[in-house]
Image (tube, rainbow, N blue to C red):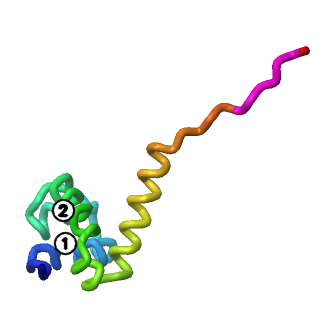
Amino acid sequence: MALSDTERRLLDFERSWWLATGAKADQIRRRLGVSPTAYYAALRRLTERWDALEYDPLLVRRLRRRDDERRRTRYEVTAPPLRRRPR
């Protein structure tokens, strides 16, 4: 399944949003016409698709690594240090 024009626009925007001035959320609304929540949900779905990986491998791999790291830090359980009982 090939990427739609809208999906390509999302990936292109994510690759270059930082070049423009202003807040990213404002740019998302103005340039793409969607809410930031909808944008991030669509972007997350796109990173799971092979055709998105073929379209922009560097961006998709970076987004996958970022999502994996966020997931890892969110669900990683850190055990408290073991304390020895006094004898």
Are dots 1 and 2 in contact, CB under 8 Å? yes
Q: Which mark is residue 33?
A: none
Say if the magenta span includes residue 15. no
Q: For the C terminus, which image quadrant?
A: top right
Q: Which residue is mark 1?
A: 10
Q: Is residue 60 left or right of residue 69?
A: left
Magenta range is 81-86
Cα separation, mark 1 vs mark 2, equals 8 Å
* Mark 1 residue type: Leu
Q: Please tell me which residue lies in front, 12 or 20.
A: 12
Q: Is residue 3 above or below residue 43?
A: below
**Residue drawn at point x = 77 percent, y = 25 percent:** 83
Name the magenta segment's main secondary structure.
loop
Q: Please tell me which residue lies in front, 48 or 59.
A: 48
Q: Which of the two labelled residues, at mark 1 and mark 2, occupies the earlier sequence position?
A: 1
Q: Is residue 69 left or right of residue 87?
A: left
Q: Which residue is mark 2?
A: 42
* Image x and y of residue 60, in percent: 33, 74
Name the quadrant containing residue 18: bottom left
* Mark 2 residue type: Ala
Q: Residues within 10 Å of mark 1 (few under 14, many from 20)?
A: some
Q: For the N terminus, which image quadrant?
A: bottom left
